Image: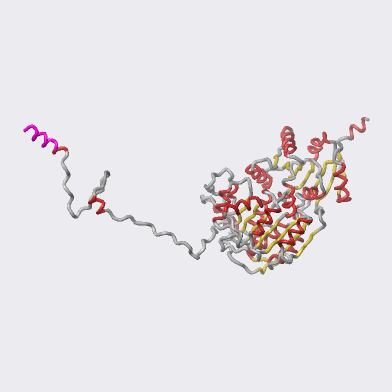
Amino acid sequence: MALHMFGNLISRFFKTPPAPPASEPVPLSTGTRSAATEAVREPRRRRPPRATGSSEQRPPRQAEQRTAALVDAPDAPSGKRRRSRGGRGRRKGDEATTPEATLGTGAPTLGPSPRELSFGPVLVSEPVKRALDHMRYESPTPIQELVIDPLLNGEDVVGQAQTGTGKTAGFGIPIAELVDAREAFVQAIVLVPTRELARQVTDEVTEICRYRGTMLVPVYGGARLGPQISALQDGAQVVVGTPGRVIDLLDRGVLRLDKVRLVVLDEADQMLDIGFLPDVRRILRSTPRSRQTALFTATIPTMIKRLIYSYLRDPRTFRVGEEAEPVEQVTQRYCEVASRDKLTALLKVLDEDEQTLVFRRTQDDVDWLVRMLERRRVKAAAIHGGLPQGERNAVMQRFRSGALKLLVSTNLTSRGIDVPTVANVINYDIPESVEEYVHRIGRTARMGREGTALTFVSEWDLDFFDAIKAHVGDDLQPLELGLYTLQETSA
């Protein structure tokens, strides 16, 4: 009897719930499913697979011209894209800051456009003419006038001209006209020797293409690969890069040049001087033989002649000015000063209201001079190859915007910098060759403006100075600073 009572007690607490009516669904329990429950469960739906092998190409993003301000974030984690300033979500009032809103241009013009408007003697399309007017380019420079039409007609071109003559727009205008923004693959590639020149060329060509919807991406070392790869995958049509990074992207399989129509070699002599010839050859072999090739250079040594013979087809050659000849608008001066007195001489000639670029020979010399200037409360910044890329970008941005008036540099910027507002170039250390001298002083008097170049000549510089003076002639005139007048009078 006790056993029977115990059994009734147990059944009260562990009574099995009644089965639901047949019309009600069987609820899913949180424990192990019964066979009946599994039988009632609906089969899992699968997403339809994505179509592969479709003949349709993904159109490039045309909301804005993405010029890989992406690479302005070198500290972004690999594989995660940081939004560029241009790709940022719009906030209230942002519309007024975009080029389209500021200029009221609306959507860019995609595809070929008739070239019916005059840019001097050159005919260009309406979108390109609008961009040139916005950039305040009224007429082409001599090198632009010579090379633009042949490039637009599909001919190979060799352009020889000194720095500051407008070579970038000489090939930038044909790129804007020939690249089809509706096609999401690399159609043009520009090879340059330095990172700074890659950014400079990208900025200028982007401005020329601003109403064409063309996507450009600069690729160079010292910046994160992730953003550059993302821009290529998004359908960039124009690549501007240094040979080393281009080779890296080719090896990774993310950059394809098999559909490239135009290759530009800018500052070709400098690229070969610093050992990029094997990389340049490999890149050219990665492009179709039917491509169009343009080569721009200040000098044409034997290596350049061999490159032209091997990779250009019946090129038309244009030359503006003599080889290693300074631009006419540069007023050239030299000052004889002892090495120990160069800092005093520099402080004497500096003008706080004008932008000045000072050249020194080594990175340590640059850093030392900036420290000495800062001790004397003169605001200055250094730029050279030993600085992180992010810092170099920030310095150049300040200099281009005018926030920085005095920049001290090695030869790194003797070709890679193009700041039209630079009024003075000072060779604190004398250049070691005529070509180096010409390229340094070519940083001023850009695009027809006037500028001044001053060279300090110390007791150790006479051999270099004699070579420069023999080449330049009477255009290089002495400047008396009066540093030693008091000493000579007292003697």
Identify the residue at the far left of this view: 1
Residue 65 on the magenta segment: no
The tally of labels here is: 0
**Residue 275 at x, y percent in the picture:** 72, 50
**Residue 476 at x, y percent in the picture:** 86, 48
Q: Is residue 211 visible?
A: no
Q: Nearer the viewer, residue 186 or 161?
A: 186
Q: Nearer the viewer, residue 151 or 252?
A: 252
Query: What is the quadrant of the N terminus in the image?
Result: top left
Residue range in magenta is 1-10
Q: Nearer the viewer, residue 124 or 216?
A: 216
**Residue 121 at x, y percent in the picture:** 73, 67
**Relative to residue 377, is residue 472 depicted above or below?**
below
Q: Nearer the viewer, residue 202 or 315?
A: 315
Identify the residue at the far top of this view: 490
- What residue is at 61 percent from the left and 51 percent from the top? 248
Query: What is the quadrant of the C terminus in the image?
Result: top right
Dominant secondary structure (helix, strand or loop) of the stretch shown in magenta: helix
**Relative to residue 407, is residue 103 depicted above or below?**
below
Q: Is residue 201 visible?
A: yes
**Residue 216 at x, y percent in the picture:** 61, 56
Residue 4 on the magenta segment: yes
374 left or right, relative to 482: left
